Amino acid sequence: MFREMRRKKQLLDHQQSVDILNRGTAGVLALLGDNDYPYALPISYVYDNSKIYFHSAKAGHKIDAIRKNRKASFCVLDQDQVVPEEYTTYFRSVIAFGQIRILEKELEIQEAMEKLAFKYYPEDSEVNRSQAIAREWQSVCVIEFSIEHLTGKEAIELVNR
């Protein structure tokens, strides 16, 4: 169903790919947008147990695209070191393919919002985090991306380091 990576020597193992998702703070979500044009947007996220969570406004291009087609991909770039004298970059990245859905149940939304809040401000108090979530509750949309296929890849120059 999903293509195998051509350059298998550059393939990261599953745990390395998960580590990149855990380390990252932003990625690019790709959806099928208006008039079937690809729609890719940078977005903050949190990874948890083969799922990626995002938050959004309740209306807009992203929400329309998700309602139209649940299939999506998500890419996180972990390293991108430009090496001018070699006309290349030493990169490390992951791409996830999966199904995306808008969360509807209050408990699911609450848990995802707490994970997002904790990732980006782990030092915050539980009380302040809860108050921040409550302030945004009526206007926020929470989205879950269920990973069906995950691949990580790194530049050949990084393979033997």
Image (cartoon, rainbow, N blue to C red):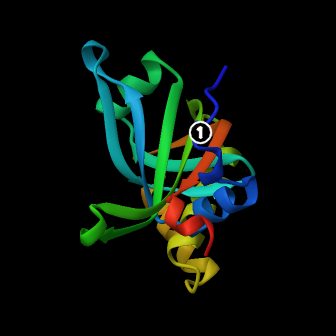
For the residue pair 70 and 80, the one nearer the viewer reads as: 80
Q: Residue at x 65, y 42 (%)?
A: 150
Residue 107, relative to residue 20: is it above or below? above
Q: Which residue is mark 1?
A: 145
Mark 1 crowdedness (10 Å alpha carbons): few <14, some 14-19, many ≥20: many
64 horizontally vs 99: left or right: left
Q: Residue at x 43, y 16 (%)?
A: 68
Q: Position of residue 38 (x, y in %)?
A: 32, 26
Residue 12, relative to residue 37: is it above or below? below
- Asked if residue 114 can be seen in this view, the reply is no
Q: Residue at x 49, y 59 (%)?
A: 155
- Asked if residue 32 can be seen in this view, the reply is yes
Judged from this view, the residue extending furthest toward the front is: 86
- Give the quarter of the figure containing the C terminus: bottom right
Q: Residue at x 27, y 19 (%)?
A: 34
Q: Position of residue 151 (x, y in %)?
A: 62, 45
Q: Position of residue 149 (x, y in %)?
A: 67, 36
Q: Quadrant of residue 19?
A: bottom right
Q: Position of residue 140 (x, y in %)?
A: 44, 47
68 horizontally vs 108: left or right: left
Residue 57, relative to residue 90: is it above or below? above
Please state which amino acid type lies under the numbered disc 1: Phe
